Amino acid sequence: MAMKPLSVREEVLDHVSELFYSCLCKARHLANLVALEKWEEKERELHLLSQSLRETSMDEGYCSRFQLEQAWGIKSDNAEVMWSAMKSLGSVLEREEGCELVRVTDLVQVTCIALVAKEATLRRKEEGVLANEPSSSFATESQPPSQSPVDSSTRDKVELVVSHLESLLRLILGVPPTCLSTSLVVTTDDVDALGLWLRPVVKTKEGRSNFKLSELSPFFVSHLHASFRDVSGWLKGAVGPSTSDVVMRLKGAQKKLIFRQDPRESATDEVLACLTIDSCADSTIYCLLPIEFVRISNCKNCTVVVGSARFAQTTHCSSLKVITACRTKVISNCMDCVFYLGTNECPLLVGDNRHVTLAPYNSYYDGLPDHLECLRISGEVNYWNVAKVVDSPYSSDPVDHSGIFAVMPPEKWSSFVIPFASEENQGASAPAGEARPFLAPKAYRQNLEAMAKRVDEVRAKIAGSGLAEDQRQALQQVIRGHFKDWLLRDGHFNEIQRLSEMELAVK
């Protein structure tokens, strides 16, 4: 079977739309939309909402967050969540406008996507097919179709997208569902707007894959517009499953150390579409790659190191340590988790979060600067400690968030060394001083330097103590004992043991 030229952006359906739907349910003017059962009625209501946004917009085709709050009756903190998601999507699609405005068509599309995704989830729950077999290693959808079977979840998403393509096109055109399709004309811009949840999966002879959707259509080779019926018919036949996108999933890892693709050994520099880590426990997971969307869910007692991401979400986790550089970070319904962040936007703590600790970014790997540049994330801007609390059941105080999150004090902060390196980079160290991305605040760096100085002083005292050989060995034994106790107490012993096992397996 020939590969389809377009695939569904599953990460938008699975991640961003979930956040949108939770916000839509709380919006004053959208209760009727969410409650409607027939899709025709939903589309009619979406058209009216789209018109209300266009009417309040001072810039034709664009709206501000304030206009969204007023037109749709959305609370300010929920609008903050929606806006962060929209800005991340804009970054993925290279739609940054240099201001705080977003396209009305994009906003209405994502709202439509949220409703469609919820419909898919409810249907799969009714059919009892939400549970998948756990896999304790990364699964990648990058093989040819013959080697990568398409699961029922992906097929459902493709079917839903195809069945709603005409609705999306009408919403982009700004026409009601009752408008006759035979009289409608579609432009290249209208088709390209569908890039929010469709992506090309084919490449040009030069290897380029980031072209516009309209460049694949046979109707715009010599014309700037085509009939609605022709374009919608072509789109329905052009959308297939994600067979050439790189979508990684990890589920059910228990007491394991898992490492995915050191960037210096990678055969490609392409950005991953999506990384999903779900239902893992007592494990250490490294994925040192540039990724558009990351979701970590239902994990416990794990350390997760993600190279870099445009949009990173952690939800329903406990006793987790996450280290990541990102543009947008969303934390929802987490307990006793620590986040070492390099983030260009304020972290959003949504829902029932308890005892979350925020700390400055504390790691480095050889490919990090290139990955940040690839994702257009600035290593000089870090809002790790300027969190915004949304919809918390424990705090209505806009200032006092005790019990929800706290900032890690400098004396508890330490650097995290990535224990992987290619042969040519053995012994290479991270850039020093101001050259390091997401440089920690001065107080944290000074405390780290003070700890290193104390270690040097202890070593110097031992070297100059004049101890006999048997005394020196006894002292070393005591130091080893205390070090082992610390490893066991802080949970690092098992991680080191797994690293040793991995090294032996490689040799």
Image: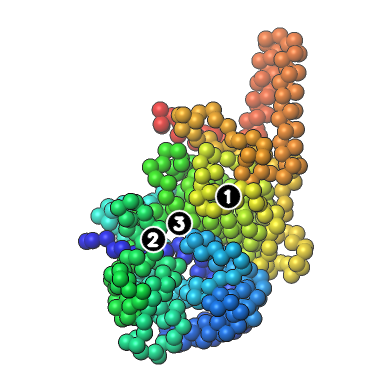
* Element marked by disc 3: strand
> Which residue is tagged 1?
325
Spot occupied by residue 329 in the image (x, y as percentages of width and height): 59, 58
Three-letter code, disc 2: Phe
> Which residue is tagged 2?
211
Q: Marks 3 and 1, Cα distance to the nearest angstrom?
A: 15 Å
- The quarter in which the N terminus is drawn is bottom left
Three-letter code, disc 3: Cys
Q: Nearer the viewer, residue 398 or 223?
A: 223
Between discs 2 and 3, the one toward the N terminus: 2
Which circle, 1 or 2, is nearer the viewer? 2
Bin the neighbour count of mark 3 within 10 Å (Cα to Cα): few under 14, some 14-19, many 20 and up. Answer: many
Q: Nearer the viewer, residue 398 or 443?
A: 443
Spot occupied by residue 453 in the image (x, y as percentages of width and height): 74, 28
Q: Is residue 470 above or below residue 185?
A: above
Which circle, 2 or 3, is nearer the viewer? 2
Q: Is residue 156 above or below residue 148?
A: below
Q: Nearer the viewer, residue 223 or 441?
A: 223
- For the point 59% across and 35% down, the residue is 430
Q: Are marks 2 and 3 in contact (CB under 8 Å)?
A: no
* Element marked by disc 2: loop
Three-letter code, disc 1: Ala
Check residue 274 in the rendering and tell me which mark sits there, or answer none. 3
Q: Residue 346, can we see it?
A: yes
Spot occupied by residue 24 in the image (x, y as percentages of width and height): 56, 76
Bin the neighbour count of mark 1 within 10 Å (Cα to Cα): few under 14, some 14-19, many 20 and up. Answer: many
